[in-house]
Image: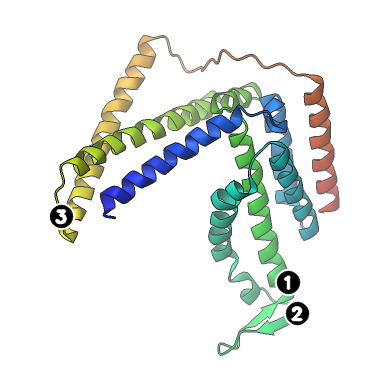
Amino acid sequence: MNFVERTLAGFVNAMERALYAEELAKADGLLQRLDPRIKVIGILALVVAAAMAHKLWVIGAVFAIALILAVYSRVSPAILAKRVWLPVLLFTGIIALPAPLVISGREVWRLPWLDWPLTAQGLASASCLVTRVETAATLSVLLVLCTPWSRVLKALRVLGVPVVFVVILGMAYRYIFLLLESAHDMLESRRSRMVGELEGPERRRVAAASVGVLISKTLQMSGDVYGAMLARGFRGEVYVLDDFKTATLDWIMLTVFVALASGAFYCGR
């Protein structure tokens, strides 16, 4: 496929992921039943506990808790492996790769031909880094997949997050889909007028021109949307019609979250 078709396929894939997240947030799972404020507090506590733990088995235990939450919330482990675990492992693995070579300690192996020593302390540090990031990313994705984005933002606002931060997150989320739709329409119209295969220089010229037009449309759209918001009474605060109600299950799960996070923090010191 040429770059136009590849880009269109990427846009369609992004839309499908967003629709999947919206449908999953409406499912009858454990996390979906909880008050968004409880989810934000509980998952944040587990993320902090995993980030501050210095023992690999403690981080692994928090990761196992995340897997249990995923199963009971009807989130497929295959989806997590494809969207979270493999990308995070690739990115964090590159960062952690030098650790076994540069951290001094007990030598466990030497690389063939290069004769570079690998230390046990370096391997432990690299493993802790990778598992910490995997655990934090998994918990964060579970929060987003199992909660409508508007409710996540309202929960953040209720818990004291500055309104500027919440508004930026909300507008960025909406603009992503507007940009995807605009870019998709542009490239779809381009493909409908193409006959044959474009040469390399022509493809680069079309790509650069498309980026420039998209940036121009983005700037114009941002001004129009902000002007419309001001005309409708926007003064910095965002209001959501959904009212949060805390049930017995919410208090039970909050107690469980706090107990697990406290235990992980105590054992991982």
Q: Which one is nearer the viewer's eye here, 161 or 27?
A: 27
148 over 133 or under it: above or below: above
Residue at x-position 15% and y-position 53% = 196
Q: Which one is nearer the viewer's eye here, 266 or 67?
A: 67
Question: Mark 1 touching mark 2, by CB under 8 A?
Answer: yes
Is 79 on the left-hand or right-hand side of 251? left
Task: Give the crowd class for mark 3: few <14, some 14-19, many >=20 residues within 10 Å.
Answer: few
Mark toward the viewer: 1 or 3: 3
Residue at x-position 27% and y-position 35% = 185
Q: Which amino acid does label 3 sit on?
A: Glu
Judged from the image, the secondary structure of the residue bearing numbered disc 2 is: loop
Which corner quadrant holds the N terminus? Answer: bottom left
C-alpha span from label 3 to label 2: 56 Å
Q: Which amino acid does label 2 sit on?
A: Arg
The first of marks 1 and 3 along the sequence is: 1
Question: Mark 1 touching mark 3, by CB under 8 A?
Answer: no
C-alpha span from label 1 to label 3: 52 Å
Coordinates of residue 86 in the picture (x, y in percent): 56, 57
The first of marks 1 and 2 along the sequence is: 2
Quarter holding residue 209: top left
Task: Give the crowd class for mark 2: few <14, some 14-19, many >=20 residues within 10 Å.
Answer: few
For disc 2, the marked residue is 106
Which corner quadrant holds the C terminus? Answer: bottom right
Coordinates of residue 107 in the picture (x, y in percent): 72, 82
Disc count in the image?
3
For disc 1, the marked residue is 121
Residue 101 seen = yes
Quarter holding residue 141: top right
For disc 3, the marked residue is 202
